[in-house]
Amino acid sequence: MTEAKELNKVAFYTLGCKLNFSETATIARTFENEGFSRVDFNEEADIYVINTCSVTDNADKKFKGIVHKARRANKDAFVVGIGCYAQLRPEELAAVDGVDLVLGATEKFKVTSYLNDLLSTPRHQGENGIVHSCEIEEANFYVGSYSLDDRTRAFLKVQDGCDYKCTYCTIPLARGISRSDTLENVLKNAKEIAASGTKEIVLTGVNIGDYGKGEFGNKKHEHTFLELVQAMDGVDGVERHRISSIEPNLLKDEIIDFVAQSRSFVPHFHIPLQSGCNEILKKMRRRYMREVYVDRVQHIKKVMPDACIGVDVMVGFPGETDELFLDTYRFLNELDVSYLHVFTYSERPNTLAAEMDGVVPIKVRKKRNKMLRGLSAKKRRAFYESQLGNELTVLFEHKHKDGYMEGYTENYVRVKMPWDESYVNTLHKIRLTKIDEDGLVLFDFVDGREQPELAPKWRAELKRNPSLGSPLKNEVPKKMSNGKDFQRITQEDNKFVSVLKR
């Protein structure tokens, strides 16, 4: 068995949402404060911590592969599973070959305290991992977190848990009741992020529009989300704030109006819809009808005409007939939104939806997912085209792909130029000029400066292989990969729905 003195390297792998990434970063800092060195997950480590997700089936299934990857890197390493899947199905996760320790919703923040279990209780061949997982009712306290994305963007957790009872969702079972960080601590964390040189903060949580509930251990809202946004706008050193996702019924006019005139909050909203059909929304127990969603979109576009609006939508929910799906398709097609995040419904244990009649065949679910992803490609293309000629501000990121670097404008247009490390984590005024073949947008600097030249190595590579530098190639269906095809769908899909031409 590995001796305690040999446990000095730890690696992390995160599945799921931005909230998980922020919590992983906080847990990693706990290890570093106790003398551990953090290494890449592909490297040999003494401890591998996997932060799990259980929103989709794919996240659950991927866990086993990640465990095997860790064991291949170091067959004698300890493997720890934490996160939502660990809370929902701890024994199932502990039974995965190679897992030594499983920690639930509250225990994950004390992972270093449980290292003694790894040392004092050797896991013999064939034995399940050790489980420490509280009842979810005990997950009633708040732990603040934030992650730094290579000093370009930080994900700041401001809220956790959810009191909504959507019939398909396991998040309340995995994360507990809605509770919030104190405003004082959120601002403290934001200042720490600013001191690191990070230019953008993304506010994250399970239901961030519910911010303020449970701030001081009770259900009373001591502060509102609007008050949080107003306070964050005054944090010096942060150039941009972005709202990750907010429920339409909690996105009030006052919030939209404040963002429109704020110093640092950007014109980008991600608003879950789930279905464009009121009948399905009622079965899901969502807290709004689609008319509310239309009102939110219209108000955003009224005060911020160039705002980017993203939509979460689910296909294949029980009872979603062809007619009801087409109702959602037409609704989204006519809605002035910029892109879709499409999820395929999957049955989750201990949810009401899993017991409902009208189960949609898997093949049909996949078909509907493909259709909405095609619509999303069309929407994104149309939004990018509407921004050509506009002067915007880009924040360049550290990503280096095939000789190019990328960045996002304040309204979430993805741009690229030849790589130059000196531009990483810097803001510049640009004028959008054209959409490149890979779907990213090209630009000119407003101040007239020339862009860096593409390195000779990559010029030669691109000459030999023109398909390089196409990071969106997997996002857009093949039959829509060319610009001229964004306004149509496949002949097969036309049997079911006609696309309204713009």
Image: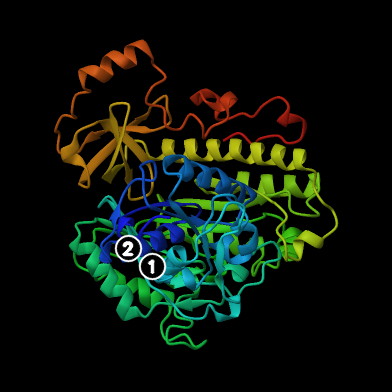
Q: How many labels does the image show?
A: 2
Q: Residues within 10 Å of mark 2 (few under 14, many from 20)?
A: some
Q: Is 334 situated left or right of 457 in this image?
A: right
| Residue in view at x 57 percent, y 25 percent | 478
Element under disc 2: helix
Closest to the observer, 466 or 431: 466
Closest to the observer, 497 or 201: 201
Q: In which quarter of the image is residue 78?
A: bottom left
Q: Work out whether residue 165 can be spotted.
A: yes
Closest to the observer, 84 or 333: 84
From this view, report whether residue 95 is shown above or below residue 178. Answer: above
Disc 2 or 1, which lies upstream in sequence?
Answer: 2
Say which mark, if any, is on residue 31. 2
Q: Quadrant of the N terminus?
A: bottom left
Q: Work out whether residue 255 can be spotted.
A: no
Discs 2, 1 touching: Cβ within 8 Å: yes
- Residue 290: percent from left, percent from top: 65, 60
Q: Residue furthest right?
A: 357
Q: Which residue is labeled 1 in the image? A: 112
| Residue in view at x 81 percent, y 62 percent | 355
Type of amino acid at the residue the image marks with label 1:
Thr
From this view, report whether residue 233 is shown above or below residue 332. Answer: below
- Residue 43: percent from left, percent from top: 35, 42
Q: Residues within 10 Å of mark 1 (few under 14, many from 20)?
A: some
Q: Is 374 situated left or right of 345 in this image?
A: left
Element under disc 1: helix
From this view, report whether residue 344 is shown above or below residue 239. Answer: above
Q: Is 394 situated left or right of 367 in this image?
A: left
Closest to the observer, 331 or 352: 352
- Residue 376: percent from left, percent from top: 56, 40
